[in-house]
Image (spheres, rainbow, N blue to C red):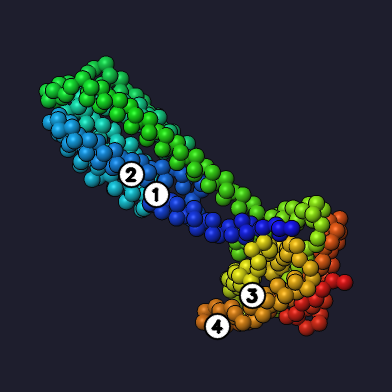
Amino acid sequence: MKPTSFDGMTKAPHRTAQLTARWRWLSFGVRAEDTATQVRKIVQVNAGVWLLIGTVLIFNALFWLIGNEALIQSGLWQWPVMLAAPTVWWLNARRHLHAARWLMILLAMVDCLLAVAGGQGTASTVHVYFLLFAVMTPTLFAVEEWPATLILVVTNLGMFLALQFGHWPAHPAFALLDAHTQAMMIQSMVVSCVLILILMTMLTEIAAADNENRLIRLAETDPLTGLPNRRQFRQALEAEGSRMAREGGSFVLGVFDLDHFKRVNDEWGHDAGDQALVHIGHVVQGQLRAYDLVARTGGEEFVLLLPHTDLAEARLVVERIRQALEKDPFTYSGQARVITVSIGLALVSDAATMDQRLRQADEAMYQAKHEGRNRVCCAP
């Protein structure tokens, strides 16, 4: 029988690091205290800069490949906007978030106007980008910034309609393009708008999924140590009980408490106490098997779930934990202190007795304390 794996439950900090790495190139201005919505808006604005720069570079390369004077001139006119675009990152990094959003949209609008005035006119339908900006603006601005959203949406719609019905003449060289190339230019403008909209939508969905995962971790993870909390432990316990009812076997529950932990708080302060708990959690996790689970249930008390295990094997695991803590003192402000634990174990061979055996493991832990601490006791 294959033991239940709780690896995904005990690696929440690792997953958080992965999410941080994912947004590394889009995280200018993001802070730990930001809400999920704030993070999403900042990431979207930063992504908009990358899309602006990438679009200008790609179309410039295409224009030079075609070799038409009107297109080349149009592309060159857009370079100042592309060079100014990283200013948005600078504003976000300095937490001028509202200004960064405004600048992002304004730069995009100016870039489109320069493409029109620089040679393309309305012949290539480049002005369709104003529709894209009108659609994207509400996703970039916060709800409370609705006046800015309304102004920019109306302005972009107005710009599109004015150019669509007013007609801006293209550079004379544009007429030298054959019909196929002109059609290709029109299609490329529409397709690029759709692709940008798809990318921004995907970014929104990814950010929403990350936020959902973050909320799940907050609900199931101890915020101090990053270990599973009581709620996640109960879920894992019920899952292991169901597995045992189907497949048979046994598992072991453990309860352990830090010895003389109050002395750490009294002598070094509560900040040291918090860091000591993080240290304990890290050391314990390092000694567990991939399918074991350790959770913090409150204060300095932790619980263990050791699936598909008998008492003899469980005792080897927790002795390894106890010895590792003895050999790895907690250090704070240059001072070291060995923090030991008292551990109680109880064997569960019947799913109906899980809660009873958990209480008995707790009683065994207190027995370990009464017998001198820094030891392991097993419930009968």
> Residue 193: which quarter of the image?
top left
Find numbered disc 4 in the image and state the secondary structure of the residue it sits on.
Answer: strand
Task: Say left or right for 121 vs 359.
Answer: left
- Residue occupying the far top of the picture: 165
Identify which residue is drawn at 45% across, 41% down. 203
Instruction: Of the two numbered discs 3 and 2 on the same chain, state the one appearing first in sequence.
Output: 2
**Quarter where residue 31 is shown:** bottom left
Q: Nearer the viewer, residue 319 or 325?
A: 319
Q: How packed is label 3: few (under 14 Cα within 10 Å), some, or many (20 or more)? A: some
Q: Are marks 1 and 2 in contact (CB under 8 Å)?
A: yes
Distance between mark 3 and mark 1 Cα atoms: 40 Å
Mark 3 lies on residue? 265
Q: Pointer 2: what residue?
A: 50
Q: Earlier in the sequence, mark 4 or mark 1?
A: 1
Give the structural element (helix, strand or loop) at label 1.
helix
Look at the numbered discs 4 and 2 and tell me whether their residues touch, using CB distance below 8 Å: no
Which numbered tag is attached to residue 26?
A: 1
Give the quadrant of the C terminus. Answer: bottom right
Q: Judging from the image, what secondary structure is the residue with disc 2 in?
A: helix
Residue 307 point in image, percent of width and height: 74, 62
